[in-house]
Image (tube, coloured by chain):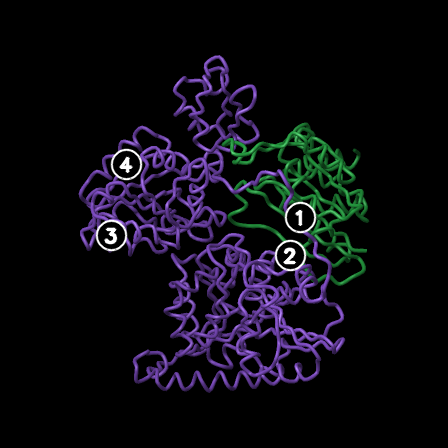
Chain colours: A purple, B green
Amino acid sequence: MKQLLLGNEAIARGAYEAGVRVASAYPGTPSTEINENVANYPEIYAEWAPNEKVAVEVALGAAVAGARSMACMKHVGLNVAADPFYTATYTGVNAGMVVIVADDPGMHSSQNEQDTRMHARASHAPCLDPSDSQECKDFMRIALELSEEYDTPVILRLTTRIAHARTIVELGERTDIPLRDYNRDIKKYVSMPANMKGRHLFVEDREERLSEAAANLSINRIEWGDRRVGVITCGAAYNYVKEALPNASVLKLGLVYPISRKLVEEFAAGVEELYVIEDMEPFIEDTVKAWGIPCSGKNKTGVQGELFARKVAEKFADAEAAGPMSTEGIPNRPPVLCPGCPHRGLYYVLGKLKLTVCSDIGCYTLGALPPLSGVDTCICMGASIGMAHGFEKARGKDQAHKTVGVLGDSTFCHSGMTGLLNMAYNSAIGTIIIADNSITGMTGHQHNPATGFDIYGNPAPQLNLEKLCEAMGVKHVVVVDPFDLKELERVIREETARDELSVVISRRPCALIIKQTNKPFVCDKNKCKNCNMCMKLGCPAIRKTENGIEIDHSQCVGCGLCANICPFGALGTKGE
Amino acid sequence: MTHNIVIVGVGGQGTLLASKILGYIGLENGCDVRVSEVHGMSQRGGSVVTYVRISDTDKLYSTIVEQKQADIVLAFESLEAVRALPYLKDNGTMIVNTQELMPMPVITGAAKYPSDCLFRLHEACKVIELDATSIAAECGTFKAANVVLIGVLAKSLPFTLEQWMNAIEANVKPKFIDINKSAFMRGYQL
């Protein structure tokens, strides 16, 4: 049977068909839908882990214990998981283990453009790079088989255009892979120096064996065409090469680390001019050049942004330039906090108090955009807390009194807890605000330990954020509703004034999950003085027209925040 | 023949359902199909662009439709339609919902919503304009505007009415099938 599947859905299907039993992940665009779909197969145990490090450890434990396993994450997640991962490539696995990592060239939803293939090389993990959903599914099985044959976790690397593209997939049946026996093997699985010296030699030897075998792997293939131009490519770039240079000879690498030198040499010898066309870093190109084989690629495309067929045609086939995509005089439409978003009230107050805000990764990063413009820094998951602490240590307690760290409930569970523990342990002065909207919002509503539900939507023990903070040694923990602006302002003033550490939990569920049914608000033109206070909220439903303030009823969810700040009582529901 | 379609709109307008229906009908009728979606940050009220490629003759590779490659742009919002003009082939068609949603730079006063969006479209290409949001509201919910627009688009694609109805049935929740079918017909009969 054929289906049109997202790359991420195809990965989940591939895991199912190839007998995976355990899957752990932390959501992150563009990888989130993998584990969401894995959870639809009852044959696989799936879970949301609090972060990617835990997910990789769970997958490794399962693999060592004999079950085929997987962990999924976005590219920056592998940084969090790098610690276990870089040693897992030494210990190896028992049953197959695949770590699926989704890169984001062009930064559609990410903070950087790091290339996971660099992690593969640095950790000595084999890395596969599929070009469409069919390959996503097929490569899952191949990755698991390679993992078992070569005794190593394997990276399956996606990019946004693979993970979030739907292409046709031929479905197959599940192969039931029995649990392998688990036998204690201290020399292999206990990473003491004496043991790992031997394992490092094993890693070296393994990589050489795989490099040799890679010449005959079906996922690496030469498509001979016009011999005047040869292109080495992989992943999404393969699709662009096939459209932009349809006649060129192509070496398509499905295994991008290690690269088969034999295959590259054979291909290079068969063509007159050699290009390497790949998204992101010159990963293949540098390797080919290091082997003394002349080629070019990144000198024409650069490393920033995505490749497209047209870009390939322009740079490598002298196609006419298409000109800019932008249209003059067209205002941008950046993403915004949704109507009814609980973060809006919080950022309004932070802006009013003119605080320095070390923010974090999540929907609330959008508080950086005008008119709220309320964010000073955003780096990575959990950095809000460490950075707020750093601000205090650099500039003293006066700075601490005007600084807050802001992060969401899911981000706090992911990697905020250790930062807060650090502050408590080191007697810090400062205020951390947990914007608790009771869900992982930006990635599309996944549960986390603070929501009280698991990946299947079943009730789960709910982390008590207040008690946790208290247990860490935070003496002042205050819970407040971010739509109660007066109280929120009072609490933040009070807590930031302290010479101690405090946590404010700004708690109100995400507007998209509570699906407010309140009547939309209207502006009473008789009362409105056009003072523009409501415009400071940056609510997409409120607009200023020639006729004064108007509320777009197709957008307003009736949250009432605007009525809360209107000094003239002009905003309300009809008839009030 | 390959049909390159670009769907543009504002996050939350239901562009994903539109691309799902198009992808489904292509697959069910033996075409090669490639769809590129947007998930994550830009979904939150930002500009969203979805690419749909359907071919009954060629094997497709790229999942992206680029400048001057689109046969049709299906625009859920007027400003997004103007933004998407560079995608259209010289003889391409713009199907546009005349709804206007203010982007934040306009709301804050940093930019102006162009008053001449439709004029600019008519200057540049063949335009089919309709108030899909109001039409959908008449069918039961303004949220079905996406399916009204699919109904308009349907006439440019080589599928039968029955095939479209099957695609709608397969892709919307059972309790919304009737509303969506009537929304589709309103667009189809336009």
At which x and y percent is residue A29? 50, 54
Determine the CA span between mark 4 and mark 1.
45 Å
Are the residues tagged 4 and 2 within 8 Å (C-beta)? no
Determine the CA span between mark 3 and mark 2.
49 Å
Question: Any mark on residue B19, and which?
Answer: 1
Judge the density around disc 4: few (<14), some (14-19), many (≥20) Cα neighbours within 10 Å: many
Which chain letter matches label 1?
B
* Pointer 4 and pointer 3 on the same chain: yes
Question: Any mark on residue A552, and which?
Answer: none
Are the residues tagged 1 and 2 within 8 Å (C-beta)? yes
Give the residue pinned by disc 2.
A166
Q: Is residue A555 left or right of residue B81?
A: left
Residue drawn at point x = 67 percent, y = 44 percent: B84
Where is residue A65, by image quadrant? Answer: bottom left
Give the residue pinned by disc 3.
A394
Could one spot residue A1 in this view of the protein? Answer: no
Give the residue pinned by disc 4.
A492
Q: Is residue B6 left or right of residue A344?
A: right
The residue type indicated by label 4 comes to: Ile
- Asked which secondary structure carries label 2, the reply is strand
At which x and y percent is residue B4? 74, 52
